Image: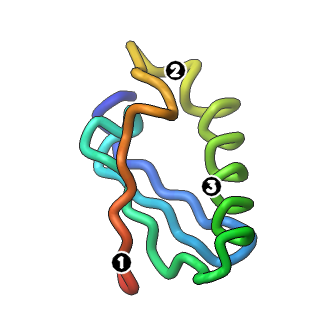
Amino acid sequence: MNDKPFEYYAGNGTIFKSDRCDFKNGVKAIDASDDKGKFAQDVAEMIGYHYRNIWPKLNGFTGYDAFEFQFSEKG
């Protein structure tokens, strides 16, 4: 599962994509809100989803503090 792509559409409109479910190469945040509060909500939502549905299936994961976001207006 580690090397499968990850994609999540959050409630405030941010789209999160990564080429790997273990986020080894970072996570692209597409169309992220300029409102920091809304972006923080989207990040929390994505992490909650990943934690419950993806992390248990991974063979090793460095944690949510160990990857970087890249920001993009288009996917």
Q: Is 40 rendered above or below residue 58?
A: below
Discs 2/1, front: 1
Amino acid tagged 2:
Lys
Q: Check the picture and name the quadrant holding the N terminus.
A: top left
Q: State the SS at label 1.
A: strand
Which residue lies most toward the top here?
A: 59
Amino acid tagged 1:
Ser
Reading the chain from its start, which is encountered first: label 2 or label 1? 2
Mark 3 nearby-residue class (10 Å; few <14, some 14–19, many ≥20): some
Q: CA distance from mark 2 to mark 1?
A: 28 Å
Residue 72 has which mark? 1
Residue 54 position by quadrant: top right
Residue 55 position by quadrant: top right
Q: State the SS at label 2.
A: helix
Residue 57 has which mark? 2
Residue at the spot of label 3:
43
Q: Check the picture and name the quadrant holding the C terminus.
A: bottom left
Q: Is 7 rendered above or below residue 52?
A: below
Percent coordinates x, y for residue 39 in the rendering: 64, 68
